[in-house]
Every structure is written in C-alpha cells, then in structure tokens.
Amino acid sequence: MDKSIKIRVQSIKSVFHHAKQATMQIQNLVRKNIQNLKPYSSARSEFSGTASVFLDANENGHDLFGEALNRYPDPLQLAVKQRIAKLKGIPVESIFLGNGSDEAIDLLFRIFCEPGVDEAITCPPTYGMYRVQADIHGTPIRQVLLTEDFQLRPQAMLEAASPNTKLLFLCSPNNPTGNLLDPAAIEFLLRYFQGIVVVDEAYIDFAEGTKSWSQRLAEFPNLVVLQTLSKAWALAGARLGMAFASPEIIHYLNTVKSPYNVGLPTQRAVLSAFETGLDGTVSTIIAERKRLEIAGVGFDFVEKIYPSDANFLLIKMEDSALIFNYLKQNGVVVRDRSREPLCEGCLRITVGTPSENDRLLALMAAFNSSTIQSSNP
Ligand SMILES: *Cc1c(COP(=O)(O)O)cnc(C)c1O
C-alpha cells in the first residue's frame, strides 16, 4: 500500500473509530435454504473416469452435424479455468465461470439475499444491472450516490448498511463514469462492511498499470471480483463472465448455478482466443481513447470530458439530446446517460475501431461548424 493511500485509510478509520473490522463468517451470510441445498447432480459430474461408451446422459450418440456438440459440456469448465488460472495467477478453486458476469450477479442475489428481507447497496451512477437484479429478486436497495468527482462515500455507505445488508456493489473502473474508484475506500469497505463486497472489474484491462483486486483474495474472505471477456477480450457474443472469490463462495456459486451454464461453443471459442491473444487491440483502444479526448475538447458543444480508465468516454455536452439524435440520424449510436444522477447532459461513447472513431469525429466536426455558423450568421 503506498503512503498516501495508507494515510487516507487511517483518516477514514479515525472518523469511523467505532466501526469494527469485519470478522464475519461467510456461511452466516448465506440464505438457510442455500446452506441446506442438495444440488442437482448431473450425469457428467457423477462419472469422472475414462469410458468409451456414454449411455448415462440421454444424449443422441450420433454426431449429426459434425461439430461434436451432441455431448453435454464439462459442467465446471475445467480446461477453461486452468487457462484463466495461469493467465491471472488465481487458483482454479477461486474461479467461477458463467454466462456473462451478469449470471454471477444474479447468483449472488440468490445465495445471499432472502427476498423481501435482505438488502444490497449500490452507488449510482453505476452499472444498471445491480438494481435490476435486486428488483428481480425482491431485494430492497439502498443507494448511496457517488461524490461529484464520482468517488465512493465509504462512511455514508457503512451508515446506510443494516444488519440485513448482504451485498455491496462497487464498479471500478466505473460504468458509465469511466474512472477507477479510490482503492483506499474499497479497502476500508472490505475491512468494515459486514457482508459481501463485489468489485466489478469489467473494464480493468483498459486501466493501465492497475492491479486487480483478485490478487488480494487471500486477505479478504468477503471479496468477490467480477471480470468478463465481453469488453477487452472482444468476446461479448460468446458470453463468458468470471467471478473470483474464496473457495467457499465459489462453492456456493457452483451449487446454485444451472448444471451446464457455459456451452461448449463458448468454451472452445474462449480457449482458442487465449491461444491467439489480444494482438495489441487494447493498446490501440487506449490510444484511440486519447485521440478522441484530444479532438473532443476542441468542439464548442463539449463542456467536459471525464477522465477515463475504460474503453468509453463520458462527455458532458451543451445539448446532449440534439447531438444524440444527430449522431443517430447519421448512423452512429451512442448511449444517452443524461438521466442518470450526476450525469446531466452526458453521453457515453464507446471507443471504437480507428475507422469508427474517424466517422464519429467527422460527424462531430460537421455538427460543430454548423452550430458555429448558425450562431454567427
Ligand atoms: C458490460 C458490463 C458487464 C457485463 O458483462 P457480461 O459479462 O457481458 O455479462 C458487467 N459489469 C459492467 C460494469 C459492465 O459494464
């Protein structure tokens, strides 16, 4: 921990001198029915050995389409996990794989939140799925807004927590604001919040020089780190999300998930992507992000471009609705975030390929000169 972070943690601690360091047992946070759950035992998980004739799973033994998709896939995706373990330096027992990281978010509510009783905390403006999943599961949500510069308010968050607050969602780099959250605040919450702290790192690969919280799982039994192959790994269509946590939490995720939650085409696509690698596209995207930022500040209608450690920019504009529609009419679709708290007048624009970004900048330049002309006839 560097010195400035240490000082911040100490100053937060002194404000919260009465907060007790979290000493919770994970099992006590888990819903009773899940603690007692006897999970479905699939044919593929009951037999582990070598055989030449599989008559145990009611599959069609004919490989009719020549893709070898007629057999159920490995329910625990061991081959993929072994590659991820190597790539990230995380033991296989601490890895859960799902149908996008959205599946892991869903399962965390199922494991920890008794509907109508247990609660979760989110910090808007942030990723919308935390609230949607809470609503689906009948989980009351307490929202503690980020500060004006999109940082956490850790004291206010602890004050918002009740004994029934089981889940805390932090997103770093945050969507839609693009910034990393102060690690001192995250560490404080990991130590003092008496529940599960989910750190969503969907955009971590775009934050140069930033270490993942997954490297600190051993220190924090209540930490769940989410990552995904949908963003930097260019596999949004394949659907593969990852949760990294203590083996105990991973055990519950595996108990609650549906038996074959990651299809064989996805497992194959992911293994082959790891063979190929990212081929420099992440550095290209980061360089393009800088190019868009520099060009963007030159436009009169741009009021502010927020600093980004992700693959998108949050841009505050004079008339965001007008620009949103102008871009749309010209075939470029961006995300209107102007109705999110603290994001008034803001569009979120994904950094595309160089030619996609050229198109965006050309349209913005044309819009800029047309508004200058109309205001100076
Ligand atoms: C895109 C995104 C995800 C979703 O990832 P999937 O793996 O595609 O489900 C999760 N969290 C955040 C913050 C995201 O922006």
Image (cartoon, rainbow, N blue to C red):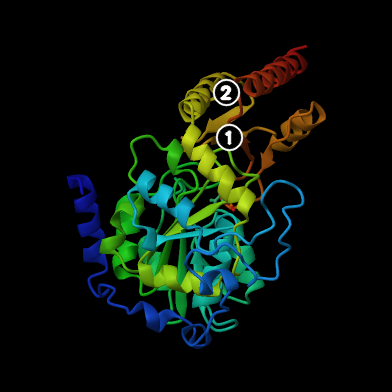
Disc 2 target residue:
296
The part of the image, by quadrant, that contains residue 198 is: bottom left
Is 328 above or below relative to 129? Answer: above
Q: In this view, does 369 lie to the left or right of 108?
A: right
Asked if the residue under mark 2 is in contact with the one under mark 1, i.e. CB atoms within 8 Å, the reply is yes
User: Cβ of disc 1 within 8 Å of ligand 1?
Assistant: no
- Decide if residue 376 is in sight here: yes
Residue at coordinates 69% horizontally, 57% vertically from top-left? 70
- Decide if residue 177 is in sight here: no
The earlier-in-sequence mark between 1 and 2 is: 2
Residues packed near mark 2 inside 10 Å, few (<14), some (14 to 19) or many (20 plus): some
Q: Which of 195 and 7 is in front in this view?
A: 195
Residue 53's spot in the image, x, y percent? 61, 65
**Residue type at the position of mark 2:** Gly
Residue at coordinates 72% horizontally, 53% vertically from top-left? 63
Residues packed near mark 1 inside 10 Å, few (<14), some (14 to 19) or many (20 plus): many
Disc 1 target residue:
315
